[in-house]
Image (cartoon, rainbow, N blue to C red):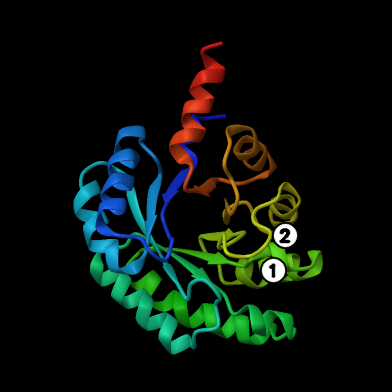
Amino acid sequence: MKSIASYIDHTILKPATVAEDVRKLCEEAVAYAFAAVCVPPQFVKLAGELTAGSGVKVATVIGFPFGYNTRAAKVAEIRQAIADGADELDMVHNISALKQGDYAFLSAEVAQCLQPVRLHNKCLKVIIESGILTDEEISRSCEVYARHKVDFVKTSTGYAETGATVHAVTLMRAALPGDIEIKASGGIRDYAFASELVKAGATRIGASAGVAIVKEEQSIAGR
């Protein structure tokens, strides 16, 4: 396995986030060569300035955290985030539609949201909130997003009672083609769990504890 740092989306999405928090997050991401930072939409421009030239991508969230924003609102959020410099868009799908079995709605939603993403060659990660879904709902969601060839399917927002699990990632990997990646997020606070998720098929780890996870990996390697 590669260094865990290369998998990490270093994340801060708490409601009271301020510019100084984002500044610290970006400095850490550059220092540890994380894959990306994931910040609230209003901080995308700042994160882009702070990570410029480093290779660290800037991600933000769309329809966050509950997913029931209208399609038009999500598209507007995506367009604004791209205009502000976001490389990657982590979008919560409409969980209410899913729970009603309305997979046609989810298909139409992602098709519309993908239009500006593809136009600007950006990356879309669809957050399904696996911790509140049945196994069938996880698998069927993945089937929808596989048909639309999204870039990633992501487990969780971190706001549901249950975040990422090895079981969910395993189900997602079985339901998705190999060219669609998986981001595990929500409750990932140590190297052992992050490693289990990678072994199960995750190619990104969303975590606010990225520095601690990397230091734990370094400590293990130094034994």
Q: Is 210 on the left-hand or right-hand side of 197?
A: left
Amino acid at pointer 2: Ala
Where does residue 210 sit, x and y in percent of width and height?
46, 40
Where does residue 198 sit, x and y in percent of width and height?
62, 40
Quadrant of the snapshot with the C terminus: top right
Amino acid at pointer 1: Glu
Nearest to the observer: residue 91 or residue 193: 193
> In this picture, is 206 found above or below 66?
above
Where does residue 157 sit, x and y in percent of width and height?
55, 63
Circle 1 SS class = helix
Q: Are marks 1 and 2 in contact (CB under 8 Å)?
A: yes
Mark pair 1, 2: CA separation: 6 Å
Q: Which mark is residue 106?
A: none
Check disc 1: other Cα within 10 Å, few if <14, some if 14-19, many if 20+. Answer: some
Q: Is 142 on the left-hand or right-hand side of 182?
A: right
Q: Is 124 on the left-hand or right-hand side of 22?
A: right
For label 2, the residue is: 175
> In this picture, is 173 found above or below 86?
above
Looking at this rendering, what residue extends furthest in the top direction?
A: 223
Q: Residue at x 34, y 51 (%)?
A: 57
Q: Which mark is residue 143?
A: 1
Quadrant of the snapshot with the N terminus: top right
